[in-house]
């Protein structure tokens, strides 16, 4: 009998949207060195979700642009992913949970 890995159907994530890869990398370094993701999002994100710490809630396949979605679904719970480029700019994605 074959066993199949559980497929992630939804991701709960937060993100930070900025205009340059350099800025995204700088913010990622700050977060990896201990700064709170939500606080950094509130201060720097260009997305309206930044006001709520970058929280995007739960989303499934087909709800986000492809590069963002692919990065979020390929990550594991707790991962900080990015920078990921979309037509909107550069994103850092924090995968908060999966189901």
Image: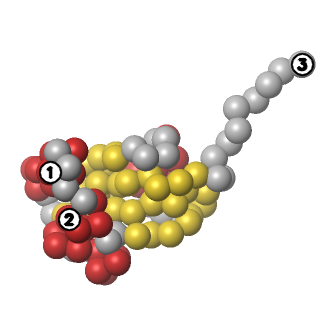
Residue plotted at (29% across, 66% down): 38
Q: Residue furthest top?
A: 1
In this rendering, is residue 47 above or below 23? below
Q: Earlier in the sequence, mark 1 or mark 2?
A: 1
49 left or right of 19 in image: right
Q: Residues within 10 Å of mark 1 (few under 14, many from 20)?
A: some
At label 2, counting other C-alpha atoms closer than 10 Å, the crowd grade (few under 14, some 14-19, many 20 or more) is some
Q: Nearer the viewer, residue 27 or 46?
A: 27
Quarter-wise, where is residue 4 in the image? top right
Residue 30 disc label: 1
Q: In the shown orientation, is residue 13 left or right of residue 7?
A: left
Q: Is residue 19 above or below residue 68?
A: below
Residue under label 2, please give it. Answer: 40
Residue at horizontal 70%, vertical 32%?
A: 5
Q: Residue furthest right?
A: 1
**What numbered label is drawn on residue 59?**
none
> Which residue position is annotated with label 3?
1
Where is residue 67 shown, x and y percent of the image?
41, 51
The location of residue 86, given as percent across then percent down, is 31, 58
> Residue 14: image x %, image y %?
39, 63
């Amino acid at each position: 009998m074959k066993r199949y890995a559980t497929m992630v159907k939804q991701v709960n994530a937060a993100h930070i949207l900025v205009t340059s890869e350099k800025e995204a990398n700088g913010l990622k370094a700050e977060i990896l060195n201990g700064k709170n993701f939500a606080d950094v999002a509130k201060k720097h994100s260009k997305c309206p979700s930044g006001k709520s710490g970058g929280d995007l809630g739960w989303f499934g396949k087909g709800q986000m642009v492809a590069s963002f979605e692919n990065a979020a679904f390929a990550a594991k719970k707790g991962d900080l992913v990015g920078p990921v480029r979309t037509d909107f700019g550069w994103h850092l994605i924090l995968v908060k949970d999966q189901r």
